[in-house]
Image (cartoon, rainbow, N blue to C red):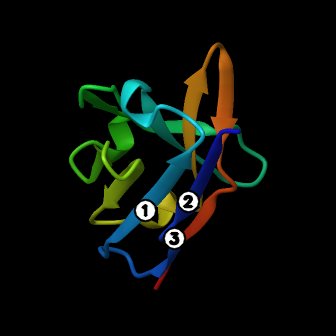
Amino acid sequence: QVRLVESGGGLVQPGGSLRLSCVASGINFKIHPMAWYRQTPGKERQLVATITSDGNTNYTESVRGRFTISRNNVRNILFLQMNNLKPEDTADYYCNTRRAGTSFWGQGTPVTVSS
């Protein structure tokens, strides 16, 4: 059974930083591309960043240069380092992977950027 568990969200002031983590189990983590999405109420889930099995990364334009996605293939953990946070980064953040055409999600971790 695939399980993704996010943590690390919270309340932070504009300009601050947070590091999100996603612990994966039930999959051969090191061979799967991974991704972070975010969602605000009433809006569709938005792709934030992706990382391939060999570490190639891609970011949505609004976070490029501020966010860094990374992975630890020994501990089966996906990370999202978020720096210089802005109020518009406020959202629930979700970890995602796909296996055999099926998409798997964690429960999400909330991030609030506010003074």
Marks 3/2: CA distance?
8 Å
Asked if residue 78 is positioned above or below residue 101 in the image, the reply reads below
Say what amino acid the circle numbered 3 marks: Gly
What SS does tag 3 mark? loop
Check residue 6 in the rendering and tell me which mark sits there, or answer none. Answer: 2
Q: In the image, what residue occupies the spot 56% across and 59% down?
A: 6
Q: Earlier in the sequence, mark 3 or mark 1?
A: 3
Q: Are marks 3 and 2 in contact (CB under 8 Å)?
A: yes
Q: Is residue 23 visible?
A: yes
Q: Quadrant of residue 81?
A: bottom left
Marks 3/1: CA distance?
6 Å
Asked if residue 72 is positioned above or below residue 113 in the image, the reply reads above
Say what amino acid the circle numbered 1 marks: Leu
Q: Which residue is mark 3?
A: 9
Mark 1 packing: few (<14 Cα in 10 Å), some, or many (20+)?
A: many
Taking the view exactly as shown, the residue that stands out farthest to the right is 42
Nearer to us: label 3 or label 2: 2
Q: Are marks 2 and 1 in contact (CB under 8 Å)?
A: yes
Whole-percent x, y for residue 99 in the image = 60, 21
Q: Is residue 113 visible?
A: no
Say what amino acid the circle numbered 2 marks: Glu
Q: With 62 as the anchor, is 9 left or right in this view?
A: right
Q: Which residue is mark 1?
A: 20
Whole-percent x, y for residue 92 in the image = 62, 58
